[in-house]
């Protein structure tokens, strides 16, 4: 545009500089103007082409987003139940809409920019996009899904036409790479390379993928494959800034390694890297393997002998007046420690009201730092929660009373009803609900968390189980039901078997509410036992 306007200005300058008589009498000058006009027309065509290209790109965006929003707005929660959709929403709003904004800014559109400025404050940021990417990797690990399963949208119980592009997979790899997580970086760079080799179009180049992939493989300690990938990079781009130096360095290290092991040089395997090629690094959680196995429904310790000790019954809460005419349906989920499930604990209307009250105040769930006692967010607890008081609505008061009637325990000293929503990859890794000695100061008045009453307020398509790694139990969410267990023995000592976890939600949106019931006020409702483990 600037070139076009500058040429117009140059022509106007020429016209102002030359009188009409001189224009008509100076063929030479007119000839010059002919060529100037030709150049001006060419510039005009370039400007039109640039505008058409930009408009075509904007139209293409609008078409894709129009189709996408028709699907997403028809069932927002169902759409976001798919973790890939949730990740791509984060990525679109954080990255791709900004690219569209820059495109439009080439010839500013005041309406669009004003709209963007108004809504930008609500957009996810880089941290949100990174968090969504890490959530996909967490699901990948827990449920042993390869990168291709995510890339093609092939998740258990889901048949949606959604997936990740070459560039999406590359960005996933870079998220891991920037966090020095080379295990996941390798998996996602490899998937990006595979899709590119399969003919999929992409912005990222093959050289860039090989550059990142080869270095990530080197960091995983696989020198033969690092050499092979770097040689492929050099073959594609001999002038690459780092490739030549990296290749010489990798070859020197490999030669040294082979000499020390008295082995001959073996060419790297041609097979692509996939889940299981490399061992996943260990982390802070000692029961990681048992926990994730239970999340997948593996390693359950439910034997026939144990199953024979589980029963179902009607429960009136010790002849509670409110349960005599309509007792609760109670099912044993586990024998020792005793875990029970109550059916029809919450109605659909009650669930919707609780969610309605909680949604405006949902905030990232926190945990108490064991060193400082300060509440803080943590990667091992990924959910949003809100706390509801009984005085806020009659339904909350009614639910609190129902919990008291069912358990026979007073809720006067219990914590507020906590409502939590687990979205993409939402989880709470193995933890105890009770506090271990020395107790936090906030427990000195009402005592420790004696028991947990957990309401499931949604069904979950895949994942989201409550698991107990110590004894191999998994309890699956069922909307409207609740589970209950004691965290403490009658002596007040913690029952360490109750260490439990909320598995990552693979597909769906998991809503729960829970009541933590404390010791004070239960002295005559649950008397002390004679031994430490009664």
Image (cartoon, rainbow, N blue to C red):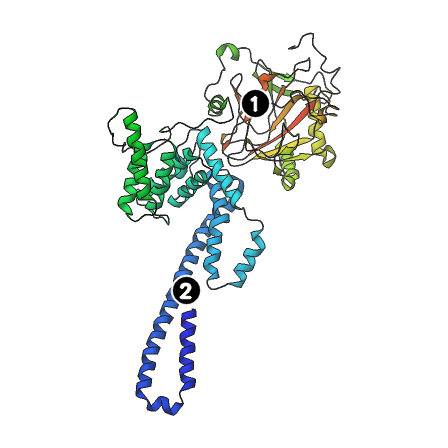
Name the residue that disc number 1 marks. Answer: 500
Q: CA distance from mark 1 to mark 2?
A: 59 Å
Image quadrant in which the N terminus is located: bottom left
Image position, residue 16 (x, y; %): 43, 85
Image: 282 above or below 19: above
Image position, residue 111 (x, y; %): 54, 62
At x 49%, y 12%, the residue is 303
Image quadrant in which the C terminus is located: top right
Res 503 seen here: yes
In terms of image quadrants, where is residue 225?
Answer: top left
Image position, residue 222 (x, y; %): 34, 31
Earlier in the chain: of badge 1 and badge 2, it is 2
Residue lying farthest top?
Answer: 530
In terms of image quadrants, where is residue 2?
Answer: bottom left
Q: How many numbered marks does the figure carry?
A: 2
Q: Cβ–Cβ below 8 Å for labels 1 and 2?
A: no
Image position, residue 193 (x, y; %): 34, 41
Counting other residues with Cα less than 10 Å from the Cα at mark 1, is it few (<14), some (14-19), or many (20 or more)?
many
């Amino acid at each position: 545009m600037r070139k076009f306007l500058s040429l117009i200005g140059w022509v106007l300058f020429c016209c102002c500089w030359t009188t009409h008589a001189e224009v008509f009498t100076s063929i030479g000058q007119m000839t010059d103007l002919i060529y100037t006009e030709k150049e001006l027309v060419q510039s005009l065509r370039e400007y039109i082409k640039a505008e058409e290209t930009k408009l075509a790109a904007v139209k293409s965006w609008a078409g894709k987003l129009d189709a996408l929003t028709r699907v997403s707005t028809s069932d927002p929660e169902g759409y976001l139940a798919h973790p890939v959709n949730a990740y791509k929403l984060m990525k679109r709003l954080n990255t791709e809409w900004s690219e569209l904004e820059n495109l439009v800014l080439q010839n500013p559109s005041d309406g669009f920019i004003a709209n963007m400025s108004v809504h930008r404050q609500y957009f996810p940021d880089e941290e949100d996009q990174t968090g969504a990417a890490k959530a996909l990797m967490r699901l990948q690990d827990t449920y042993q899904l390869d990168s291709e399963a995510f890339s093609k949208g092939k998740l258990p119980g889901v048949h949606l036409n959604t997936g990740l592009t070459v560039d999406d997979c590359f960005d996933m790899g870079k998220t891991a790479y920037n966090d020095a997580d080379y295990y996941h970086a390798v998996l996602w760079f490899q998937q990006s390379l595979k899709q590119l080799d399969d003919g999929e179009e992409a912005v990222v180049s093959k050289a860039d993928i090989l550059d990142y992939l080869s270095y990530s493989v080197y960091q995983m300690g696989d020198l033969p494959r690092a050499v092979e990938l770097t040689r492929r990079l050099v073959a594609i781009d001999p002038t690459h800034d780092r490739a030549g130096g990296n290749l010489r360095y990798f070859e020197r290290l490999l030669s040294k390694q082979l000499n020390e092991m008295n082995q001959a040089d073996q060419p790297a395997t041609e097979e692509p890297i996939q889940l299981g090629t490399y061992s996943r690094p260990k982390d802070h959680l000692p029961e990681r393997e048992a926990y994730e196995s239970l999340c997948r429904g593996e390693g359950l310790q439910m034997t026939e002998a144990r199953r024979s000790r589980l029963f179902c019954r009607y429960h009136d809460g010790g002849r509670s007046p409110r349960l005599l005419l309509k007792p609760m349906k109670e099912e044993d989920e586990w024998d020792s420690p005793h875990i029970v499930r109550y059916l029809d604990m919450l109605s659909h209307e009650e669930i919707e009201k609780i969610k309605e009250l909680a949604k405006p105040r949902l905030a990232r769930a926190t945990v108490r730092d064991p060193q400082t006692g300060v509440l803080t967010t943590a990667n091992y607890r990924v959910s949003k929660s809100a706390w509801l008081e009984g005085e806020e609505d009659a339904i909350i008061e009614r639910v609190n009373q129902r919990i008291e009637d069912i358990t026979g325990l007073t809720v006067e000293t219990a914590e507020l009803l906590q409502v939590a929503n687990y979205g993409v990859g939402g989880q709470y890794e193995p933890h105890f609900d009770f506090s271990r000695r020395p107790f936090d100061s906030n427990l000195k008045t009402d005592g420790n968390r004696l028991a947990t009453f957990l309401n499931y307020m949604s069904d979950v398509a895949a994942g989201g189980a409550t698991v107990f790694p110590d004894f191999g139990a998994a309890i699956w969410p069922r909307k409207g039901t609740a589970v209950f267990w004691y965290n403490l023995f009658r002596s007040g000592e913690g029952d360490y078997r109750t260490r439990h976890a909320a598995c990552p939600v693979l597909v769906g949106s998991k809503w729960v509410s829970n009541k933590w019931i404390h010791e004070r006020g239960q002295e005559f409702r649950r008397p002390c036992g004679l031994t430490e483990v009664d």
